[in-house]
Amino acid sequence: MRALFLPFVLLWCSAVQAEPVQKSEELSVEVVEKEIPEFPKIQVAQGFGGIREVPFSSRKEKPEGDIRIGRFEVHPGAGISYKYDDNIFLDADKTFSNGTLQSPTSDSIYNLKGSLGIIKELEAGDSWGFDLFYEARDENFIKVNAQDFLHHDLDTELTLAGEGGRSQLILFGNFLRTVDPPTTEFASNFSPRQKRTSTVLGERFQWALTPRTLLRLNGKIDFQRFDASVLEANDKNDFQASASAFWSWTRLTSFGINLIYENTLYTAPQSVNLDSNLYGFFVVAKFEPSAFISGSLGLGYQERFVAGGSSRAGFSYKADLSYDFSSRTKFFLGGERSIQDSIFAATSVNIMTDINVAWEQQWPLFPKIGTRAFLGYANLDFTRARADTVNGGGALKKQNDDITTASLDFIYNIQKWLKTEIGFRHIEADSNFDANDYVSNVFTLSVSTVF
């Protein structure tokens, strides 16, 4: 089943995915590029100091089924899942003066999902393609039912192809109505799991200037709004843009340069101005040394200027490697170093460094059964020193967090349109601020169908 959330688009995307694509001896952007799939790495949610799950399966994965209305494919879907989470707010253990210990809040959560996808594929000779996906998820807690919420997620994409397939323009939009699980630091000041709305509009343009040269221009703006008036100061508009030029050295190897810019504007008055601008460049290589191995590497420099201080600059990179050991066994390796912005006043600009490895397996003796495993580590190095009032006696220090995650999933494809999954995920955060330490164990069981 398609994943629920479309991950926040990182500034790196155009850098590490940009490459000329070729068909025979000609360059044609109609040809779909070979992508390295996303894995459930724990992506640090900017400013929340917490985590956000990046789904294992790409949301854009085409579902099974063949319901057609003219050139359009229609894909309705539904699902039900059970989840047990022993730390729903990513809380730290609390020890009181009398020696008693309060453990984090645990709960059982049931989800009902419904979705609808409408697709018109961009085939050879077509001038346009279309993709729409909507999903509603009703999240119900057993113990803390005040946290129940109905999530809405709408994703649209219109692709326009130029004559001969040498140019392509993609216009996209996303509307997300959801809540986020904050850490203790955030929950101690505001009610947990605040409701918010994110509206994203953007474009991706690419033009095969010559048979060996590809140009790309990408841009998007994200309007983020919180429901609670106490969080009004965190409402923001985030604009991102990038420009890339790539040259194909061989049919399987390309090099290029990528320039990026980001402007973050907070829409409500603040006591400390957190508006920021980020500038950066990357030298990027994408390669496929064999039919079994493909990867990309971007090396560069980023600098983020914050109006109220906490500016940061430094070396940045992103790397991905995919190894298809066989048609049933695949391995993936990824790493990244980037400068992240803040959202809440309690946090600041930080440098995030992570590395992750994943394994995907279909079993020859049981062709309907698959497994996937993931192991990842991330470090957050914050810029601005702040007081540790919990266990530090008010001493000023810069926050530094280590986040480790491991997951294991079993998938049983009952039919091509029906599958069930069992999964376990372990997350552990170790911070020099004790209030930010937490351990989370999540067990999930789901049944889903997409026609």
Image: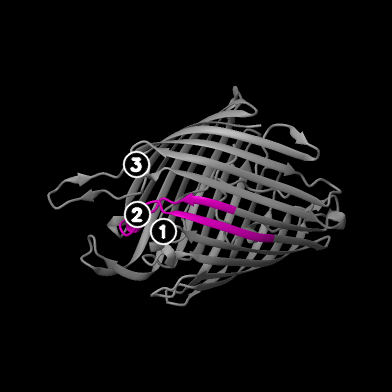
Q: Position of residue 311 (x, y in %)?
A: 46, 74
Q: Relative to 345, say whether 335 is above or below.
A: above
Identify the element where label 2 is drawn. loop
* Disc 3: CA contacts within 10 A as few (<14), some (14-19) or many (>=20): some
* Disc 1: CA contacts within 10 A as few (<14), some (14-19) or many (>=20): few
Name which residue lies at 60% across and 66% down: 240
- Residue sitting nearer the eye, 155 or 334: 155
Which numbered mark, 3 or 1, is in the foreground of this view? 1
Which numbered mark, 2 or 1, is in the foreground of this view? 1
Q: Are marks 3 and 1 in contact (CB under 8 Å)?
A: no
Q: Relative to 73, say whether 195 is above or below.
A: below
Q: Which amino acid type is shown beneath numbered disc 3?
A: Val
Task: Identify residue for label 1.
Answer: 228
Identify the element where label 3 is drawn. loop
- Residue sitting nearer the eye, 49 or 364: 49
- Residue that lies at the very extreme toward the top in this rendered image: 365
Which of the numbered marks, if any, corresponds to residue 144?
Answer: 3
Q: Position of residue 224 (x, y in %)?
A: 52, 61
Which residues lie in the magenta part?
175-203
Task: Identify residue for label 2.
Answer: 191
Q: Give how far apart the Cα atoms at labels 3 and 1 are.
A: 19 Å
Which of disc 1 and disc 3 is earlier in sequence? 3
- Say which quadrant the C terminus sits in: top right
Name which residue lies at 78% across and 47% down: 122
Name which residue lies at 70% across and 42% down: 118
Name which residue lies at 20% across and 65% down: 393
- Residue sitting nearer the eye, 435 or 115: 115
Which of disc 1 and disc 2 is earlier in sequence? 2
Q: Which amino acid type is shown beneath numbered disc 1?
A: Ala
**383 falls in the magenta region:** no
Q: Are marks 2 and 1 in contact (CB under 8 Å)?
A: yes
- Say which quadrant the N terminus sits in: top right
